[in-house]
Amino acid sequence: MGAALPCLVGLPADDEGLDVVPAIAVGGAGDALLELGEELGEKTYESLARKGETMTTAAMVTYAYDQIDQARAELNAASK
């Protein structure tokens, strides 16, 4: 098996190299993150994860709002 995709930064890997994601800590987000990693590919996922590690909370909020605005614009354009 290749290198495991990271689920959350700072969480330890088990003895098989798989990231350990406590369900209580992430509320089921671990599965979604694994699926995202599979879709993006390991290299892209890890690159984006490293970028995310360096973001401040304010930058995360700004990014999220920008993504919401973009999705809203695309939905509005598609409905016209």
Image (cartoon, rainbow, N blue to C red):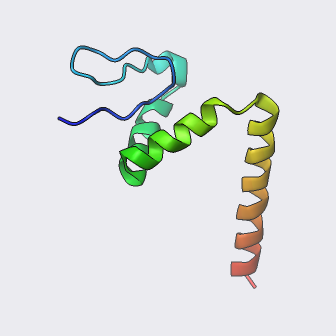
Which picture quadrant has residue 73?
Answer: bottom right
Rendering coords of residue 38 (x, y %): 35, 47
Q: State the residue at coordinates (76%, 74%).
A: 76
* Residue at point 76%, 30% (across, down): 56
Q: Quadrant of residue 78?
A: bottom right
Q: How many marks?
A: 0
**Coordinates of residue 2 in the picture (x, y in percent):** 22, 36
Q: 75 and 33: which one is in front?
A: 33
Residue 62: image x %, image y %? 81, 44
**Which residue occupies 37% across, 35% down?**
5
- The answer to whether 42 appears left or right of 68 in the picture is left
In front here: 29 or 5? 5
Work out whether 51 lies above or below 18: below
The residue closer to the viewer here, 27 or 56, is 56
Q: Quadrant of the N terminus?
A: top left
Q: Is residue 69 above or below residue 80?
A: above
- Say if 51 sits above or below 71 in the image: above
Q: Is residue 68 left or right of residue 6?
A: right
Q: Residue furthest left?
A: 1
Horizontal and vertical percent for residue 25?
53, 17
Quarter of the view holding residue 12? top left
Quarter of the C terminus within the rendering: bottom right
